[in-house]
Image (cartoon, rainbow, N blue to C red):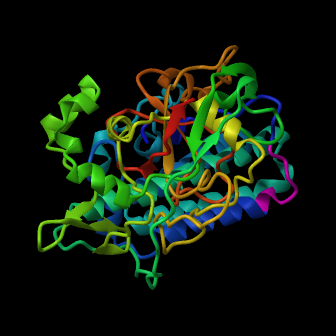
Amino acid sequence: MAARADAIAPTRDTPDRRPDLLQRFQFVRALSLALAANLSDADASAQSMPDASPAKWHLAHTSWFFETFVLRDHVPGYRLFDDRWPFLFNSYYEAEGERMARPSRGLLTRPSLDEVRAYRAHVEAAIAAAWDDLPDAAHDLIALGCHHEEQHQELLVTDLLHLFAQNPLAPAAWAPEPRRPSMAPDPIRWLAGREGKAEIGHDGDGFAFDNEGPRHTVWLAPHALADRLVTNGEWRAFVEDGGYATASLWLSDGWAWVRENGIEAPAYWRRDADGAWAERFGLDGQGPMDLAAPVRHVSYYEADAYAQWAGGRLPTEAEWESAAQGLDPTQGNFLDAPGAVRPLPVTPGEGLHQMFGDVWQWTRSAYLPYPGFRAAEGAVGEYNGKFMSGQFVLRGGSCATPRGHPRASYRNFFYPHQRWQFTGVRLAKDI
């Protein structure tokens, strides 16, 4: 999540000044440590690809954020825990000076995981000690930092999954939950979406990142959305029908990507002893594929090709958001604690299912600024606007997203070839 993880500029006039902010800060910080509790120093130091970062780096970078923008800038006389560390744990903040190149983060065998934990404890103690004397601006930055750290919690989990998937031993990050029997869902039902004039974008009530606004008018053509996400079973039918070998289904860049990389199925799918796509690798290790669960770890190219094969298309972000407005964004399968991080089968019922949680849903919308967009001032405003090129918008959050983090207006974004996150598909069609 090269861009989104540091796209942390808040909207103006939407400070998150809840009385329980200190409690929230402590909860978020504790969850990060819990996610890494079972890791060895080696587990937490390795980097499996340039798009991923070591778990240790995520733990330190989120602490660097609070130390830099809260303690350094708002606590008189504060001294850095180690004045060499900003070079190691700055991510993309040009205003904060030189930094270690992202692909080299796996070379940081020092500091150790225990030293990083000590750094976290130091930062947390310093913020708690200064709490009553911090100005409002610092409290706003702490609220922002909590949302930022939640993004890195998802990255820590998904980067760890990618790392463990490279190991021939197929290690598990944590023990699997008992498997519950699941039944194939009903066929997709098509639900007509809103037509004509609609408003999307954050409405200014509560926290939002700057790329979620301004709120503005869009015009929606007649369309319908699938009532649920595409499942593993449906995707396996696409694979078995030659979907990855049929050039006519693919965008030109997507077809080149498939051929150059030998792509045959979603990431982390594994063949069983008979050669069938029947297993998958997850944070609980390798096991049988749940055909009723949403497909995950597919790129934009794959999502678009599947939609072509299925006779539909991907929704626009305006179609998705207009459908999600009024739904409770905390209701879904989210990251609540270490343990089960996997999409779950849909629960039968009427209406739209799985709009929030389970998997991020690709849209066909390019990641571009909304009309009237202005990046926030200062270093924290660097990393939304300048990434608005060559990426596509995803919506809804995933099973690796902390509960309460997404909302209807939340805009995630990735490059079209990326698929190490929990990314999946909801179909749309014109009517």
Dominant secondary structure (helix, strand or loop) of the stretch shown in magenta? loop
Q: x, y percentage for residue 415?
A: 38, 32
At horizontal 40% and vertical 23% (from top left) the residue drawn is 390
* The image quarter in which residue 172 lies: bottom left
The vertical placement of 162 against 225, above or below, is below
* The image quarter in which residue 242 lies: top left
Question: Which residue is more in the foreground, 61 or 311?
Answer: 311
The vertical placement of 402 against 68, above or below, is below
The vertical placement of 204 against 24, above or below, is above
Rendered-image quadrant of the C terminus: top right
Q: x, y percentage for residue 124?
A: 65, 61
At horizontal 70% and vertical 52% (from top left) the residue drawn is 329
- In the rendered view, does 310 fall on the left or right side of 427? left
At horizontal 56% and vertical 35% (from top left) the residue drawn is 7
Question: Which residue is more in the foreground, 321 or 37?
Answer: 321
Q: Which residue lies furthest to the top in this view?
A: 372
Residue 226 visible in this rendered orientation of the protein:
yes
Question: Which residue is more in the foreground, 44 or 311?
Answer: 311
Q: Does the magenta stretch include residue 56?
A: no
Q: x, y percentage for residue 32?
A: 54, 63
At horizontal 70% and vertical 27% (from top left) the residue drawn is 195
Q: Which residue lies furthest to the bottom in this view?
A: 178
Residue range of the region highlighted in magenta in the rendering = 16-22
Rendered-image quadrant of the N terminus: top left
Q: Does the magenta stretch include residue 18?
A: yes
